[in-house]
Amino acid sequence: MAEDTKHRTARRRGPRVALFVLAGLVLVGAGLGGAAYWKLNGNIRGVDISGQLGTARPPASTGGAFNVLVLGSDSRSGANGGLAGGDTGDSARSDTAMVVHVNQAHTAASVVSIPRDTLVPRPACTDADGKQVAAARSAMFNSAYEVGGPACAVKTAEQLTGMRMDHFVEVDFAGFAGLIDAIGGVDVTTTVPIDDKDSGLHLDAGTHHLGGDRALAFVRTRHGIGDGSDLGRIELQKEMVRAMLGQVGSLGLASDPVAMWKLGDKLTSALTTDSDLASVSALVGMAQTVKKIGPDQLTMVTLPVVYAVSDPNRVVPKAPDAQQLWTALRGDRSVPQSVLQDQPTNPAQTSPSDAATGTWSGTPSRTPTGTPAGTPTGTPTGSARATAVDGGAE
């Protein structure tokens, strides 16, 4: 298909893209006048979860540091059903979850992806209808959103990390696909073929230009590449972030107000946020706050995990690495080297010979013989680098 074979030869620029570069695009609202501002403002869906969160929370951030929980919803309702397939009911889980920590000086940020199948204690929650949801000793992280909405996802993230989530941002399938189309698609490179009947993605090895629907399939792919785990899918999502930042930086939006307006309209239509962030002025304020954070100041890692003894299809936070990671971020320090050096690799960037033999360094090993029952063990078998956003697809 033309979309698959198109290859952009123009060299991508490496702009200093702010952490929330897409949020910054809503600056167009202020530039185009009051009517445009109110149009973009009305696009954003805000959810007031403060009452549901209660007071039993980690202490508020001080000194300027802040944390944002970014969620990708797998809802099949409305336009999402046609993109995602499957049931079209109202239930949804947080298919993607990332904790973003911005440091006190607003000069660096760390992004931690939480595998959706991670077993964690889930606190008691109150959903949007006021219904009480009982606590669970061990539940998949992404189930929190399903049973209690964004408030329960925030509470679960706070209990896991020991950090207050100052904001949350959510994008669903349709919003993500529309956003990719609005920036003109993205370029991604894979060194091995991808053939995933579940996501509908079929790519030969090489560089491909993907529109919204196929970009969505790329970030949802897990069975057609690597060992089929969620850890591999997270690495594909990181590659998509790099591709998006590179594409946005190449658009020359500052000199094209029409393109800016179209993208701002798509962006604000795609977002659901907490009520404090649900305005153009709030998003612009956040974008201004993180404007010094460019590709070299952004570190992306996956929460260190091991296979759960209770269920080989689930993972649990790896001790002591996971706790060391959260402790560092709570202290406004950078990601520990032990975590940086023990990351999954991108299954789309493995060698063809590794793919043919099923060798992939993104999977935690199984519990070794002789390990006492109930002891979580196993580490990723490779030592891949953490992902630093570099302004373009690899």
Image (cartoon, rainbow, N blue to C red):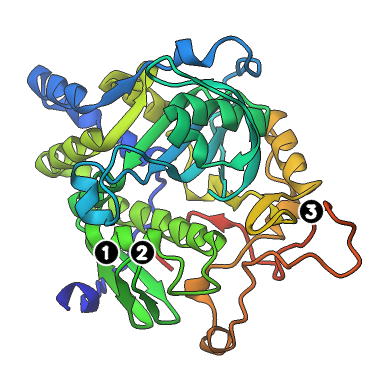
Residue 36 horizontal/vertical position (percent): 11, 25
Question: Upstream in the sequence, badge 2 or badge 3?
Answer: 2
Question: Upstream in the sequence, badge 1 or badge 3?
Answer: 1
Q: Are marks 1 and 3 in contact (CB under 8 Å)?
A: no
Q: Is residue 192 above or below residue 187?
A: below
Residue at the spot x=40%, y=26% of the render? Answer: 286
Residue at the spot x=32%, y=62% of the render? Answer: 217
Report the side of 391 relative to 175 (left or right). Answer: right
**Disc 2 versus disc 3: distance between alpha carbons?**
31 Å
Q: Which amino acid does label 2 sit on?
A: Phe
Q: In this view, does 45 lie above or below 112?
A: above
**Disc 1 versus disc 3: distance between alpha carbons?**
37 Å
**Disc 1 versus disc 2: distance between alpha carbons?**
6 Å
Q: Mark 3 points at which residue?
A: 376
Q: Is residue 349 above or below residue 70?
A: below
Which element type, helix, strand or loop, lies under badge 2?
Answer: helix
Q: What residue type is labelled 1?
A: Arg
Q: Which amino acid does label 3 sit on?
A: Pro
Residue at the spot x=64%, y=72% of the render? Answer: 361
Q: Is residue 114 above or below residue 347?
A: above
Q: Are marks 2 and 3 in contact (CB under 8 Å)?
A: no
Q: Which label sits on residue 248?
A: none
Depth order, front residue of 281/249: 281
Q: Residues within 10 Å of mark 1 (few under 14, many from 20)?
A: many
Q: Which label sits on residue 218?
A: 2
Res. 105 image quadrant = top right
Residue 266 in view of the camera = yes
Res. 323 image quadrant = top right
Q: Mark 1 points at which residue?
A: 214
Q: Do the residues labelled 1 and 2 touch (CB within 8 Å)?
A: yes
Residue 195 horizontal/vertical position (percent): 37, 78
